[in-house]
């Protein structure tokens, strides 16, 4: 297997107000399928991280996960999804539903059109995602049809986090050199995002250069002001309301329309088996803590 897997095809799985939502497909080579049934391939669907505000399906793609999936005989898809502003988290639910519907109804036909011999088994899908993409993985487990057979979120967002709603009065974020970043004095750099009309075309990818895209700073501003939950749920002032409550009471105080975005609230006995990967930062690097839960 090559150290740098090649994307075999890029498909548009939907279009919203002129924005194309794309899915990159990677296929295992023949050596990965020796001794296995080649009638159809299991599929791993991956969603990238980036705080739900930045990133793309290519920029934050974990090559180690892609390689391991291909080595195991899985097909692999890395897909676009709606970034916050002008959209909110409710668009994420529609994204996972639309993507899985497209996989079931269209993907194999598109492979045949490209003269690719592989067939995807839509009954054998695993949904994975890192950080913010982990939330998409969980949402797929809640709302996608067919339901994924398993989930594999990598330090994925799953519930209401206190730092989403608590205002920060001291520097709280460090740069790549470990230096604390100062708090922003005003929202002036992001007024164009704050006032972005809901009817504007959705955004599905950004540059990773913070000097070229204001969304990087806007994410920090939302965490500084405790407004991240407002933009996630589409409920203005929700973060400030929750911040006044005891931490143990915040989840129960979520409006019904907002609860659907929080897997820790919505998961029930039908939730897919989940393999959790969490990262604990240490002075010497990091260690991965692995567990399996239903």
Image (tube, rainbow, N blue to C red):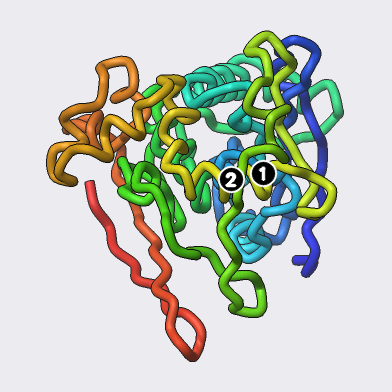
* Residue under label 2: 219
| Element class at badge 2 | helix
The image quadrant that residue 18 belongs to is: top right
**Residue 34 placement: quadrant:** bottom right
Task: Residue lying at the far front in this picture: please name it.
Answer: 185
Number of numbered tags placed on the structure image: 2
10 Å crowding of disc 1: few (<14), some (14-19), many (20+)? many
Q: Position of residue 121 (x, y in %)?
A: 54, 32
Please tell me which residue is depicted at 74% across the width and 37% down the height of the picture. 205
Q: Secondary structure at mark 1?
A: loop
* Residue 22 shown left or right of residue 277 in the figure: right
Residue beneath label 1, please?
Answer: 54
Q: Which is more toward the observer, 65 or 215?
A: 215
Residue 167 appears in the picture as rendered: yes
Location of residue 164 with respect to 202 vertically, above or below: below
Q: Is residue 262 left or right of residue 118?
A: left
- Which residue is at a point 37% across and 28% down the rendered structure image? 261
Question: Which residue is at 39% across, 22% downward?
Answer: 143
Q: Residue 169 location in percent, x, y? A: 42, 57
Q: Are marks 1 and 2 in contact (CB under 8 Å)?
A: yes
Identify which residue is drawn at 51% across, 84% down: 285
Asked if residue 195 is positioned above or below residue 225 in the image, the reply reads above
At which x and y percent is residue 50?
A: 60, 48
The one nearer the camera, 236 or 254, is 236
Q: Dot 2 surroundings within 10 Å: few (below 14), some, or many (20 or more)?
A: some
**Residue lying furthest bottom:** 284
Find residue 106 and name its label: none
Q: Nearer the viewer, mark 1 or mark 2?
A: 2
Query: Residue 223's spot in the image, x, y percent?
Result: 48, 47
Residue 145 appearing in the image = no
Res 276 → quadrant: bottom left
């Amino acid at each position: 297997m090559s150290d740098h897997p090649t994307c075999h095809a890029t498909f548009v799985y939907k279009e919203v107000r002129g924005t194309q939502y794309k899915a990159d497909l990677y296929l295992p080579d023949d050596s990965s399928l020796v001794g296995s049934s080649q009638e159809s391939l299991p599929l791993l669907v991956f969603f990238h991280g980036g705080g739900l505000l930045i990133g793309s399906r290519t920029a934050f793609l974990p090559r180690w996960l892609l390689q391991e999936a291909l080595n195991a005989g899985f097909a692999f898809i890395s897909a676009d999804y709606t970034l916050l502003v002008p959209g909110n988290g409710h668009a994420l639910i529609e994204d996972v539903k639309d993507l899985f519907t497209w996989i079931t109804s269209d993907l194999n036909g598109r492979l045949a059109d490209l003269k690719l011999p592989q067939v995807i088994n839509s009954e054998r899908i695993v949904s994975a995602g890192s950080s913010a993409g982990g939330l998409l993985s969980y949402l797929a487990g809640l709302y996608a049809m067919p339901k994924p057979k398993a989930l594999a979120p990598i330090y994925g967002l799953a519930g209401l986090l206190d730092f989403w709603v608590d205002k920060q009065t001291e520097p709280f974020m460090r740069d790549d050199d470990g230096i604390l970043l100062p708090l922003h004095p005003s929202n002036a750099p992001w007024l164009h995002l704050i006032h972005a009309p809901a009817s504007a075309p959705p955004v599905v990818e950004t540059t990773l250069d913070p000097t070229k895209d204001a969304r990087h700073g806007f994410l920090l501003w939302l965490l500084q002001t405790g407004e991240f939950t407002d933009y996630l749920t589409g409920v203005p002032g929700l973060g400030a309301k929750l911040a006044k409550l005891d931490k143990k009471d915040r989840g129960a105080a979520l409006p019904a329309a907002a609860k659907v975005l929080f897997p820790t609230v919505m998961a029930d006995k039908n939730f897919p088996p989940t393999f959790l990967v969490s990262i604990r930062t240490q002075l010497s690097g990091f260690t991965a803590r692995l567990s399996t839960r239903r």
